[in-house]
Image (cartoon, rainbow, N blue to C red):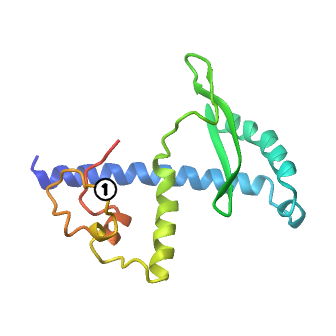
Amino acid sequence: MNTKSMYKSIYLKSWGRILIAMIISFIFVVSVSRLHPITKAEKDAPLEIFTAYLDERIPDIMKDYNIPGANIALVKDGEVIWTEAYGYADLETGRKMTTDTYLRVESISKPVTAWGIMKLAEQGKIDLDSPVKQYLKSWSFPESVFSEEDITVRQLLSHCSGLPLGD
Protein backbone atom coordinates (compact mmCIF):
# COMPACT_ATOMS: atom_id res chain seq x y z
CA MET A 1 0.00 0.00 0.00
CA ASN A 2 1.48 3.34 -0.99
CA THR A 3 1.58 6.38 1.31
CA LYS A 4 -1.26 8.16 -0.47
CA SER A 5 -3.68 5.21 -0.19
CA MET A 6 -2.62 4.64 3.42
CA TYR A 7 -3.48 8.24 4.33
CA LYS A 8 -6.75 7.96 2.39
CA SER A 9 -7.66 4.83 4.36
CA ILE A 10 -6.80 6.50 7.68
CA TYR A 11 -8.72 9.62 6.61
CA LEU A 12 -11.86 7.62 5.73
CA LYS A 13 -11.72 5.61 8.98
CA SER A 14 -11.30 8.77 11.07
CA TRP A 15 -14.21 10.45 9.30
CA GLY A 16 -16.35 7.41 10.03
CA ARG A 17 -15.50 7.59 13.73
CA ILE A 18 -16.09 11.33 13.83
CA LEU A 19 -19.43 10.95 12.07
CA ILE A 20 -20.57 8.23 14.47
CA ALA A 21 -19.55 10.32 17.51
CA MET A 22 -21.36 13.38 16.15
CA ILE A 23 -24.52 11.38 15.37
CA ILE A 24 -24.55 9.87 18.86
CA SER A 25 -24.00 13.31 20.43
CA PHE A 26 -26.76 14.82 18.30
CA ILE A 27 -29.22 12.03 19.14
CA PHE A 28 -28.39 12.40 22.84
CA VAL A 29 -28.98 16.17 22.82
CA VAL A 30 -32.18 15.91 20.78
CA SER A 31 -33.59 13.08 22.88
CA VAL A 32 -32.86 14.90 26.12
CA SER A 33 -34.38 18.15 24.87
CA ARG A 34 -37.49 16.42 23.54
CA LEU A 35 -38.05 14.43 26.70
CA HIS A 36 -38.55 17.60 28.64
CA PRO A 37 -38.74 20.84 26.64
CA ILE A 38 -37.62 23.80 28.74
CA THR A 39 -40.39 26.26 29.50
CA LYS A 40 -39.88 29.98 30.13
CA ALA A 41 -40.45 29.45 33.87
CA GLU A 42 -37.82 26.70 33.95
CA LYS A 43 -35.37 28.77 31.94
CA ASP A 44 -35.58 31.54 34.54
CA ALA A 45 -35.58 29.11 37.51
CA PRO A 46 -32.95 29.52 40.21
CA LEU A 47 -29.79 27.44 39.88
CA GLU A 48 -30.82 25.16 42.77
CA ILE A 49 -34.03 24.11 41.03
CA PHE A 50 -32.26 23.45 37.73
CA THR A 51 -29.45 21.45 39.34
CA ALA A 52 -31.98 19.43 41.35
CA TYR A 53 -33.65 18.58 38.03
CA LEU A 54 -30.27 17.53 36.59
CA ASP A 55 -29.56 15.37 39.65
CA GLU A 56 -32.88 13.62 39.07
CA ARG A 57 -32.73 13.31 35.28
CA ILE A 58 -29.08 12.58 34.46
CA PRO A 59 -28.89 9.17 36.19
CA ASP A 60 -31.96 8.05 34.20
CA ILE A 61 -30.41 9.22 30.93
CA MET A 62 -27.15 7.49 31.78
CA LYS A 63 -29.03 4.26 32.47
CA ASP A 64 -31.03 4.53 29.22
CA TYR A 65 -27.87 5.05 27.15
CA ASN A 66 -25.60 2.74 29.16
CA ILE A 67 -23.22 5.56 30.15
CA PRO A 68 -21.06 4.44 33.10
CA GLY A 69 -19.94 7.87 34.28
CA ALA A 70 -20.09 11.58 33.54
CA ASN A 71 -18.84 14.91 34.82
CA ILE A 72 -20.99 17.93 34.12
CA ALA A 73 -20.17 21.61 34.58
CA LEU A 74 -22.41 24.61 34.09
CA VAL A 75 -20.63 27.74 32.91
CA LYS A 76 -22.16 31.21 33.01
CA ASP A 77 -20.35 34.31 31.80
CA GLY A 78 -17.10 32.36 31.62
CA GLU A 79 -17.29 31.15 35.24
CA VAL A 80 -18.02 27.59 36.41
CA ILE A 81 -21.12 27.92 38.58
CA TRP A 82 -21.85 24.25 39.25
CA THR A 83 -20.21 20.84 38.83
CA GLU A 84 -21.37 17.34 39.59
CA ALA A 85 -20.15 13.81 38.94
CA TYR A 86 -22.38 10.83 38.24
CA GLY A 87 -21.71 7.11 38.01
CA TYR A 88 -18.39 5.34 37.90
CA ALA A 89 -14.91 6.28 36.71
CA ASP A 90 -13.93 2.59 36.65
CA LEU A 91 -16.56 -0.13 36.57
CA GLU A 92 -14.08 -2.95 37.21
CA THR A 93 -12.85 -1.52 40.52
CA GLY A 94 -16.12 0.23 41.43
CA ARG A 95 -14.34 3.60 41.67
CA LYS A 96 -16.92 6.38 41.65
CA MET A 97 -16.71 9.36 39.35
CA THR A 98 -15.73 12.64 41.06
CA THR A 99 -15.57 16.19 39.78
CA ASP A 100 -11.77 15.80 39.95
CA THR A 101 -11.72 12.72 37.70
CA TYR A 102 -9.83 13.46 34.50
CA LEU A 103 -11.73 12.68 31.33
CA ARG A 104 -10.82 13.01 27.68
CA VAL A 105 -13.28 15.23 25.86
CA GLU A 106 -12.68 13.43 22.58
CA SER A 107 -14.87 14.35 19.62
CA ILE A 108 -17.47 16.30 21.57
CA SER A 109 -15.04 19.24 21.62
CA LYS A 110 -14.82 19.42 17.83
CA PRO A 111 -18.17 21.12 17.14
CA VAL A 112 -17.65 23.52 20.07
CA THR A 113 -14.20 24.46 18.77
CA ALA A 114 -15.51 24.82 15.22
CA TRP A 115 -18.34 27.07 16.44
CA GLY A 116 -15.85 29.31 18.27
CA ILE A 117 -13.56 29.52 15.26
CA MET A 118 -16.45 30.37 12.94
CA LYS A 119 -17.57 33.14 15.34
CA LEU A 120 -14.03 34.57 15.20
CA ALA A 121 -14.07 34.27 11.40
CA GLU A 122 -17.42 36.15 11.28
CA GLN A 123 -15.83 38.91 13.36
CA GLY A 124 -12.85 39.08 10.99
CA LYS A 125 -10.41 37.90 13.66
CA ILE A 126 -9.49 34.68 11.84
CA ASP A 127 -9.06 34.10 8.12
CA LEU A 128 -10.07 30.53 7.31
CA ASP A 129 -7.65 30.35 4.39
CA SER A 130 -4.59 31.63 6.25
CA PRO A 131 -1.96 29.23 7.56
CA VAL A 132 -3.02 28.05 10.99
CA LYS A 133 0.57 28.44 12.19
CA GLN A 134 0.06 32.22 12.40
CA TYR A 135 -2.62 31.69 15.09
CA LEU A 136 -1.12 28.77 17.04
CA LYS A 137 2.07 30.16 18.57
CA SER A 138 2.71 27.69 21.41
CA TRP A 139 1.79 24.46 19.63
CA SER A 140 3.91 22.32 17.32
CA PHE A 141 2.50 20.20 14.54
CA PRO A 142 3.06 16.45 14.78
CA GLU A 143 5.36 14.93 12.16
CA SER A 144 3.67 14.65 8.81
CA VAL A 145 4.54 14.39 5.14
CA PHE A 146 2.68 17.69 4.65
CA SER A 147 4.21 21.13 5.06
CA GLU A 148 2.97 22.78 8.24
CA GLU A 149 3.38 26.15 6.51
CA ASP A 150 0.56 25.24 4.11
CA ILE A 151 -2.04 23.93 6.59
CA THR A 152 -4.96 26.36 6.81
CA VAL A 153 -7.66 26.88 9.43
CA ARG A 154 -10.24 25.69 6.89
CA GLN A 155 -8.30 22.45 6.34
CA LEU A 156 -8.16 21.77 10.07
CA LEU A 157 -11.90 22.41 10.42
CA SER A 158 -12.73 20.09 7.54
CA HIS A 159 -10.26 17.39 8.68
CA CYS A 160 -8.32 17.49 5.41
CA SER A 161 -5.04 19.03 6.63
CA GLY A 162 -3.14 15.76 6.36
CA LEU A 163 -2.27 15.70 10.06
CA PRO A 164 -2.02 12.19 11.50
CA LEU A 165 -4.53 10.86 14.01
CA GLY A 166 -3.60 11.38 17.63
CA ASP A 167 -4.61 9.93 20.96
Whether residue 103 sits left or right of residue 161 in the image: it is right
Residue drawn 55% across the image and 17% down it = 92
Provide the secondary structure element on which disc 1 rests: loop
Q: Residue at x 16, y 60 (%)?
A: 146
Q: How many marks?
A: 1
Q: Is residue 133 left or right of residue 71?
A: left
Question: On the image, which quarter does residue 29 sit in?
Answer: bottom right
- The residue furthest left is 2
For the residue pair 24 and 44, the one nearer the viewer reads as 44
Q: Residues within 10 Å of mark 1 (few under 14, many from 20)?
A: few
Above-or-below relation of 17 to 138: above
Residue on which disc 1 sits:
139
Is residue 157 toward the left or the right of residue 134 in the image? Answer: right
Residue at position x 17%, y 49% in the image: 6
The residue nearer to you, when weighing 31 against 125, is: 125
**Mark 1: which amino acid?**
Trp
Q: Position of residue 20 (x, y in %)?
A: 47, 50
